[in-house]
Image: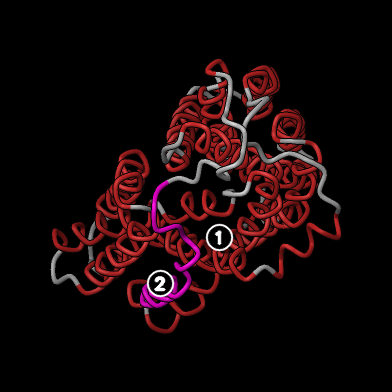
Amino acid sequence: MATAAVYVAFVTSGFTFATWAARIPSVKSQLQLDARQLGLLLLALPVGSIVSLLLAGACVARTGPRLAVAAASLTSAAALCLAGFGAHGGVAVTAAGLGLLGLSTGVWDVAMNAEAAAVEQQAGRSMVPRFHASLSGGTVLGAGVAAACAGLHVPVAAHLAAVAILVAVAVPLSTRGYLTTGPRAAGHVPVRDALRTWAEPRTVALGVFVLSMAFSEGTGNDWLATAMVEGHSTSVAAGSLSFAVFVAAMTVGRWFGPSLVDRHGPRRVVRASVLLAMVGLATTITGPHLLLALVGVVAWGLGTALGFPLGISAAAEDPARAAVRVGVVSSIGYTAFLAGPPLLGLLADHVGVLRSLSVTLAVTAGGLLFTGGFRADGVDTGPADSPAPAAATNT
C-alpha cells in the first residue's frame, strides 16, 4: 500500500507541473505577453518553491509526510485553478496561482521524498530512484494530455480545473496508505533545531553534491537541444530528439539503477555515475559528428540519473531527522535549477551554447569531492536496536 501511495504522489506531482508547463504558450497568447513579461511571470513559481523549501523540512517533520502531502496537493489544486482562471485576463491572478503552486510544490516534494525514504528503509532495498523515474513518467503523461487539450482547443481554465479536481481527490485519498509504523520522517522537531541542520557538515555536503547533479540535469533539460542545433549544426528536429534521448536515458537510469545500488552500495555507484556523466558531457561537447555526440548524451543522462534521488535517500537515513535534512538538501539542490540556466545563458552569449556546457562538466566533476557522505554499503534499514518494522500491510 505505501509503495503504491508514494508512486501516486510522484506521478501526480510530475503530471501537475507538466499540465501547467505545456499550456504556457496558450497563456502567453491569451494574456498577450511579450518574452520579457512572460519571463517575469514564470519567475513566480521557482521563487515560491525556493521560499517553501527553506521551511518545508521543519513543516513536514512537525506534521508528518501523510498530512503534508495531502495539504500540499489540495493547495496545488487550488493554485492550478487560480493560474487557469487568470489566463483569461488576469496576469496578477495567474502570478498568484504560480506563486502558490511553487509554495505547495516545495512542501509536496520534501514530504513525498521523506515518505519514499521511509518506504525504502522498510523494504531494505534501493527504491527512491524508481520513484523519481515515475515522476518523469508523470511529466510525460501530463505533457501529452496537455498537448491533446491544446490541439482540441480546450480552454486553459477548464483543462487546469479538471486536473485540479483529479489531484485534489486522488492524492489525499492515496495518503491513507502511508506508513503508520516503522521508519518514518515525522516527529516534533523545534524550528531552532531544524535550522541547526544547515550547519551539519554531512548534510551540507550531500546538498552540494545534489546541487552538482541538479545543475547537470537542469542544463541538459534547458540547453541540450539548442546546443546540438547551434554547436553540431543539426536540424531543430534532431535537437529535440537529442533532448528526448537525454530524458529517456535518465528515466532508464533511475528505473534500473537501484539494483546496482543494492549490489555495490551508493558510494561506489554515485562516484561511477559522476565519472560517466563527465565522459558523456565531454563527448557531447567535443564529439566530431552527431552520432558520437548522441552517444555522449546517453552517457550524460545515465550518469546524471541517480545523483539527485540517491542524495535525497542518503539525507533521509535517520528517520527522526529525515524531513529536515531532506529539506536542506533539496533547498541547496534546487538552487541549481533556478540559477543554472541563466548563468549558462550569459556565458553562451560569449562562447556559444555548446562550449558553455564546459561549466556543467566542471560543476559535475566538483560533485566528486562531496561523495564521502554516502554509505559504502546498501540501504540503511535503521539503527540496530530499532524495533523491527511490522506491517506487511504497510508495504
- For marks 1 and 2, give the CA distance: 19 Å
> Which residue carries the number 2 mark?
368
Q: Position of residue 73 (x, y in %)?
A: 70, 31
Name the one closer to the observer, 183 or 239: 183
The mark nearer the N terminus, 1 or 2, is 1
How many numbered circles are shown?
2
Q: Residue at x 37, y 43 (%)?
A: 254
Label 2 element class: helix
Percent across and percent down for residue 115 are 61, 36
Q: Which residue is mark 1?
A: 337
Relative to 234, say whether 362 is above or below.
Answer: below
Relative to 269, say whether 83 is above or below.
above
Residue stretch in magenta: 358-378
302 relative to 306 in the view: left or right: left
Residue found 14% across the figure and 62% down from its top: 292
Instruction: Give the x, y percent position of residue 69.
Output: 70, 33
Judge whether residue 309 is colored magenta: no
Q: Main secondary structure of the magenta part?
A: helix
Residue at x-position 57% and y-position 61%: 333
Q: Where 149 falls versus 24 (above or below)? A: above
- Identity, as a three-letter code, of the amino acid under mark 2: Leu
As drawn, is 13 to the left or to the right of 151? right
Of residue 134 and residue 329, the one placed in the foreground of this image is 329
